[in-house]
Image: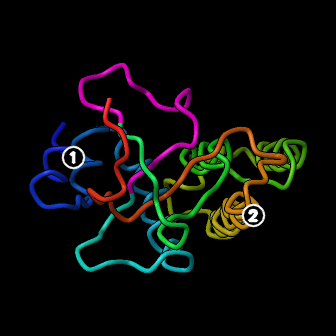
Amino acid sequence: EPVYQAILQDGVCYSRPEYVQAKYEESAHIFLTAYHWFVEQLPHYVPRPEGAQFPYWAFADLWSVDASGPGRVLTLEVPADQVVLFDLYDWNRVVQLGYLGLTREEERTWRRELSLQGLREYDVMSTVFYPQQRQEILDSWQRLFRHHTALLAGDRTGVGGVQAGLWCIRREWIVHVR
């Protein structure tokens, strides 16, 4: 509801790190790690407007939206140059601070090799003690954007669910409020 009210009042709403901190509390550091990485990548696809700090998430399919809490579900039509599209299951791997392989088998192999070293992905990403493995995970996250161009063209091949990253939500993008 605060997002919708801000859009009505100002015509646009921007997300901020403190919103993520407040929402996720003791787990916020996990989300902030993924979000900060995403913020570094997003300008390669969508120019950052003045005032933008953190992304908003949108979904192509209503089944992907958690509408169980208070607030509203906004149906948006976002210009293609204002959005980056990706597989929501790939984003889940990033938010889990995990290695994002080209295939699930590659991911399992990578985790097995990490396990042989007595490590877990979370350990690697939440400390400074494993810089090589951490960099391998961060490099793998670039694969998040592998479907962007195809998704813009309407091709969902190999994608479990379509998620979008936006710098903001603008009033003129709203086509329906539920």
Name the spot of residue 142 as percent of width and height, x first. 68, 67
Q: Residue furthest top?
A: 68
Give the left or right position of residue 73, taking residue 96 as reference: left
Going 58% across and 49% down the picture, which residue do you hit?
97
Compute the Cα span from label 2 to label 1. Answer: 30 Å
Q: Does the rendering let one see residue 133? A: no
Classify mark 2: helix, strand or loop. Answer: loop
168, 136: nearer the viewer: 168
**Residue beneath label 1, please?**
3
- Residue type (three-letter) at the residue carrying disc 2: Arg
Judge from the rendering whether residue 81 lies leftward or rightward of residue 10; answer left or right. right
Magenta region includes residue 59: yes
Q: Which residues are magenta?
A: 56-73
Residue 79 in percent (x, y) is at 49, 66
Camera-nearest residue between 4 and 111: 4
- Which of pointers 2 and 1 indicates the residue nearer the eye? 1
Question: Is disc 2 surrounded by few (<14), some (14 to 19) or many (20+) residues within 10 Å?
Answer: some
